Amino acid sequence: MANLKEEYTQHIQDTAPDMDKLWNRISEEIDKKETETKAETTYTENRDQIKRSGGYMKIAAVAAAFIVVFAGVNILNESKKTKTAMDNIPLSRPDRKDDTSSKNKNSDMTDNKTDNKANNAQSGETAQNEAAEDAATSTIRYEQLRFNSTDTVAYMADYVPQGDEYFVEDKVFKSTDCFADVTVIDAELSAENGATYVLQVNSMYDKDGEYVVSEIVLNSSTPYILQENREYLLPLKRTGEDNYSIVFENAPQIEITIDGGAVFQNGWKTLSNGAEDLEKDNLNVNDYYFDRMKYSPSLDLESFLREWNNA
């Protein structure tokens, strides 16, 4: 029996499991389960946390955006309030220095523009005045004017004129008995006897007014020839019944253009208002009066005769 007990005990020992190994295995399984459970729990928690975090982030983003918009509106309102407050600050205050400087700059720019406009206006006015002065003193050429054609020479150096050497309007006015607007029908020129002119009278005026004369004949030794087919306004002196002579021969006579203008020497002050200087090509010997001839585009005969009557 003793052997049987020993054998059974030995059998039990031989067949009994290794408890350490078994525990180790059990421990490993337990650890594995715990790890898996923990991992699963961690994953779940993390996923829930992520979900919660994502929703929070969305909420946070919306909130942040709202805050930004709200803050922006406040800033804009504050800016407007600040600007209004600054506009209400008196200009004399020190804290208005920059704004005042800006306004001063704008004022300076406005003043400069005003000054520039004034300067431009003044320059324009000056230019107009200069242009008017240039027009008043401009020079035109005798050859540019409109006259009837003629074959008569304009000047003869051998002719010795009658009368004074210097032309003075007042003296001529006082020596004139009548003015005659005439057209030269014929001019007979002679070195010995001067010239004989046959003149068609277009109109004639004395101190009492206009009177009718159809034709006159006069002799003259003026070197400034009255040319055939040309029109003149002559100062005449009566030398007898129906006889006349030219009052001043030592200068060109007033010559009337086709369009009603007048060419005259500058001694005629009454005609000089608004007249232009006149030049002539191919001057003859001693033809010095054409250095001081003038042209008026319109002969104001009424004013001219009135001045003569009042002389």
Image: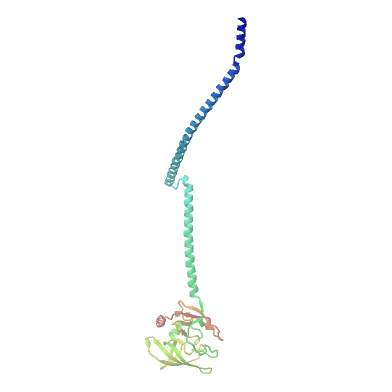
Residue 168 visible, this orientation: no
Q: Is residue 237 visible?
A: yes
- The residue located at (49%, 68%) in the rendering is 127
Vertical arrangement, residue 56 with respect to residue 288, above or below: above
Q: Residue at x 49, y 61 (%)?
A: 116
Q: Viewed as shown, does residue 134 lie left or right of 211?
A: right
**Viewer-nearest residue: 286 or 20:** 20
Near-viewer residue (218 or 52): 52
- The x and y percentages for residue 186 are 47, 92
Q: Is residue 47 left or right of residue 311?
A: right
Residue at the image position 58 percent from the left and 22 percent from the top: 28
Q: Position of residue 304 (x, y in %)?
A: 42, 81
Q: Quadrant of the N terminus?
A: top right
The one of 264 and 63 positioned closer to us in this rendering? 63
Q: Please name the colour scheme applied to the rendered image.
A: rainbow
Q: Can you give x and y, in whole percent of width and height, for residue 43 in the image? A: 52, 30
**Viewer-closest of 292 and 78:** 78
Q: Relative to 152, does residue 15 appear above or below in the rendering?
A: above
19 shown above or below 245:
above
For residue 14, side relative to residue 264 (left or right)? right
Count of marks overlaid on the render: 0
The residue at 48%/33% (across/down) is 51
| Quarter placement of the C terminus | bottom left
